[in-house]
Amino acid sequence: MHGRIEGQAFINKLCIYLKSELINAGYNSIVPTLDERFWMKGGLNDNSTHPEASFTSNW
């Protein structure tokens, strides 16, 4: 569990760094999972259009 939490923190920092480098180079850039407009649902949901899906997001 520690590796997963620390690993995700590393990935987030790396994504932020890469995003800033791309923006500084004149490109549009976004990190979908860190954007405030991003949402996701995990787990099985019998009320959804596809109840067999265990994960969905708006991206």
Image: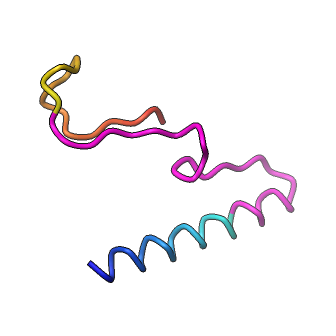
Q: Is residue 4 above or below residue 48?
A: below
Q: Is residue 2 above or below residue 39?
A: below
Question: For the point 60% across and 52% down, which residue is it?
Answer: 31
Q: Is residue 14 left or right of residue 59?
A: right
Magenta region: which residues?
19-44
Question: For the point 58% across and 37% down, which residue is it?
Answer: 37
Residue 33 in the magenta stretch? The answer is: yes
Depth order, front residue of 59/39: 39
Report the colour scheme. Answer: rainbow
Q: Position of residue 36 (x, y in %)?
A: 60, 43
Depth order, front residue of 31/38: 38
Q: Is residue 51 above or below residue 11?
A: above
Depth order, front residue of 58/5: 5
Q: Position of residue 57 (x, y in %)?
A: 40, 36
Q: Position of residue 41 (x, y in %)?
A: 32, 38
Q: How many marks?
A: 0
Quarter where residue 12 is shown: bottom right
Q: Position of residue 40 (x, y in %)?
A: 39, 40
Question: For the point 15% across and 36% down, which residue is it?
Answer: 44
Quarter where residue 17 is shown: bottom right
Residue 32 in the magenta stretch? The answer is: yes
Depth order, front residue of 30/22: 30
Q: Which corner quadrant holds the N terminus?
A: bottom left
Question: For the point 18% across and 19% down, which residue is it?
Answer: 47
